[in-house]
Amino acid sequence: MKKYNGGQELIRTGATKSVSTFLSLQSMLKLRTRLKHMFHSPEYASNTSYANKSQSLSCIAIAEDNDFWGTVEECVAISEPFLKVLREVSEGKPTVGSIYELMTRAKESIRTYYIMDENKCKTFLDIVDKKWRDQLHSPLHAAAAFLNPNMRRDITNQIYTFTKAHGMFGCSLAKEARNTVAP
């Protein structure tokens, strides 16, 4: 396999099991053509340890399955933005003040990817929002985001826009929610 993959590893490890899974999917996608070539190579077909074994035939069927590769592409596309967030957070730089911006960008990439499939978009964003609420969202993050000098001006302008009911905050639904939803 290393001969056909140019020495690149198919299975990659990360900080967590989930990260390792997504990194491995990225690697598989990157090596898709080489994997297919390996399964159809003379060396593979003539090796009695592999040829015509049920596990081997299953692997070949998976490597040739376009639905499988479409699902891998989808997983990679929606996981990459969140892997970037995890990389930023784990690099040791102060990120408490920027976690909101990083998550907003990652969620926006899901909206862009699923622009034609509202149901899938909602499904994935609901999962992200639940994880966000349960594990990452805290008053400390909110305060740090507000105090972040790069974002403070934008947030202050948005609060002004909210209280004055300008733009989208001027629509009837937004006005109705003003007394129940915090800025």
Image (cartoon, rainbow, N blue to C red):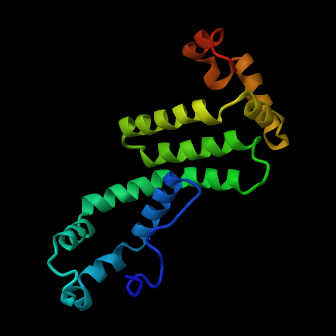
Q: Is residue 172 above or below residue 145?
A: above
- The image quarter in which residue 165 lies: top right
Picture coordinates of residue 136, whole percent (x, y): 64, 36
In-front residue for pair 165/43: 43
Residue 154 seen by the camera: no
Residue that appears at 23% across and 64% down: 65
Determine whether, in the image, residue 60 is placed left or right of residue 23.
left
Tell me residue 156's x, y (percent): 80, 29
Q: In the picture, residue 60 is in which quadrant?
A: bottom left
Residue drawn where x is 69% and y is 22% of the image: 166
**Closer to the camera, 137 or 16?**
16
Q: Is residue 54 left or right of residue 170?
A: left
User: Residue 58 at what x, y percent from top left?
Assistant: 20, 67
* Image spot of residue 157 (x, y percent): 78, 30
Image quarter for residue 90?
A: bottom right
- Residue at horizontal 59 percent and vertical 9 percent from the top: 176
Which residue is painted at 21% across and 73% down in the image?
56
Quadrant, the N terminus = bottom left
Answer with left or right where residue 64 lies relative to residue 112. Answer: left
Q: Is residue 39 visible?
A: yes
Residue extending farthest to the front is 49
Number of numbered discs: 0
Quarter of the image with the C terminus in it: top right
